[in-house]
Image: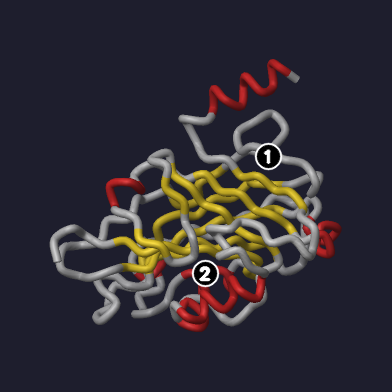
Amino acid sequence: MHSFLTYVFLLLPLQPFLFCHAFPTDQKILKGASKGGSAADVRKELKKAEIIPTVIDDFMPSLFMQVSWSANKTAELGNTIKPKKLQDMPNVNLTINPPSTTWFSNVQWVITLTDPDAPSRDNPEWSEMCHWIATGISNTDSISTIPLGSENSAKFEEVMEYKPPGPPPKTGKHRYVFLAFVPANGTAEKLHLSKPKDRQHWGTGKERHGVRDWAVENGLIPVGANFIYSQNKKQ
């Protein structure tokens, strides 16, 4: 056990971690990330920020999604973080609701990051901008904690390499939206996801198109979300 923990801590500065664990249904968890509330509260915040339905169709989260960076910054469903604090690939934690644990066992997870406000929210002609697609993440035991990159997890793969948020000057605040997906058919087999041919519009060539189109194309459904705001210091 000691050697395994040592291995985990050695990996910490090098790459992100995905942790999956269950929580009691009546427990108020993730005080920052979920504003101390339930899945319904997370959904409410996504609607308030117009992420539902602008970025993704309406859904009820099946899990809570924590995202943090090495600069000691955490996504809290709409807090603002300076771009310079977001340069390192983030750590991601998924906390699963017990009624969903059986269904989630052995599935392949997909994590994405998208910017629907490129170059600005008022003029989203480049939106959406793809910032990250990570896959090859599996959870063989939904009660346990499994770090990415360890000998106990599937091989971590970046379909689209993490591109740190970099909102242009004088474009106001951008929403940077993290979404967790699973295969709609619940398969445990290795996913072969399509890679967007361009970050802009997620390769669709159509304004306001992005992660939703890509998820449908790849047979994925959303199960969790979180987001931040970030803006260039020159406004």
Residue 107 in the image: state x and y as whole percent: 75, 54
Which image quarter: residue 149? top right
Q: Is residue 219 visible?
A: no
- Alpha-carbon span between mark 1 and mark 2: 23 Å
Which residue matches tag 2? 214
Residue 187 in the image: state x and y as whole percent: 77, 59
Q: Is residue 136 left or right of residue 173?
A: right
Q: With respect to residue 118, does 88 lie above or below?
A: above
Q: Nearer the viewer, residue 62 or 36?
A: 36
Residue 211 in the image: state x and y as whole percent: 49, 69
Q: Is residue 155 left or right of residue 121?
A: right
Q: Is residue 154 left or right of residue 163?
A: right
Which image quarter: residue 40? bottom right
Residue 35 in the image: state x and y as whole percent: 55, 65
Quadrant placement of the C terminus: bottom left
- At a point 44% along the width and 72% down the height, the residue shown is 210
Q: Is residue 46 left or right of residue 164?
A: right
User: Label for residue 24?
Assistant: none
Which residue matches tag 1? 154
Query: Could you tell me the amino acid type at mark 2?
Result: Trp
Q: With respect to residue 57, does 19 lie above or below?
A: above
The answer to the question of whether label 1 and label 2 lie on touching residues, with beta carbons closer than 8 A, is no
